[in-house]
Amino acid sequence: MSKAVYQYCPMCATKLHELQHSGQPRMACSDCGFVQWGNPVPVVAALVEYEGKVLLARNVAWPAHFYALITGFLERNETPEQGAIRELKEETNLDAVESSLIGVYPFPMKNEVIICYHIKAVGQVSLSEELADYKLVEPAELRPWRMGTGLAMADWLSVRQLPVNWIELK
């Protein structure tokens, strides 16, 4: 079972207990019937093509050697594509000129579903306070990881008949 968000019912304040619901163990309230479903959170990602290369960014909280795609949470009342374009603008100040869906990928480690787009971008890079650095990588030199957005990167490379050389994260 995934990590519980609530220990007490947000409806009636009764302590939640693990109960079978819809064939799964879930935290639920035996008094009012509230069920903590634990559904995955939708996250958007952008594989950004900029000046003929792929832009990878490093979050301020990450180790110095770790770079990844632009990601963020989907906001209320926006499509996943709009969310990916918004995250690109917020985090890099780049403008999307073209976008297409790469795919949808499970990321059970963080209880997320990643919706990834290939976005061609223009403009001048200006990083938000969330990002510490970025680098531009030739597509043939990309090394995807075997989870999350790395799966999208591998699919993007495969469609372009570029080599998929996996990197093992430690």
Image (cartoon, helix red, strand yellow):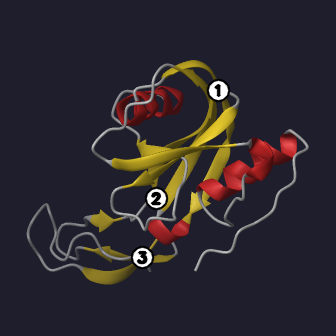
Q: Nearer the viewer, mark 2 or mark 1?
A: 1
Horizontal side of 40 relative to 104 (left or right) equals left
Are the residues tagged 2 and 1 within 8 Å (C-beta)? no
* Residue 156 coordinates in the image, percent (x, y): 76, 43
Q: Which element type, helix, strand or loop, lies under badge 3?
A: loop
Q: Quadrant of residue 52?
A: top right
Dot 1 crowding, Cα within 10 Å, few <14, some 14–19, many 20+: few
Amino acid type, label 3: Ser
Q: Residue at x 76, y 51 (%)?
A: 141
Residue 166 is situated, as x and y percent measured from the top left of the image, at: 76, 66
Q: Pointer 2: what residue? A: 40
| Quarter of the view holding residue 6 | bottom left
Three-letter amino acid code at the position of disc 2 = Pro
Residue 13, percent from left and from top: 8, 70
**Callout 1, which amino acid?**
Glu
Q: Which residue is mark 1?
A: 51
- Going 36% across and 48% down the picture, which residue do you hit? 131
Instruction: Determine the residue located farthest toward the right in the rendered image.
Output: 161
Q: Is residue 101 left or right of residue 9?
A: right
Disc 3 to disc 2, C-alpha distance: 10 Å
Horizontally, residue 168 falls left or right of residue 135, namely: right
Q: What is the CA distance from the residue labelled 3 to the residue labelled 1?
A: 41 Å
Residue drawn at the location 25% of the way across and 67% of the way down: 33
Q: Quadrant of the C terminus?
A: bottom right
Pick the front one: 37 or 105: 105
Task: Say what secondary structure mark 2 lies in.
Answer: loop
Residue bearing the label numbered 3: 2
Q: Is residue 6 above or below residue 100?
A: below
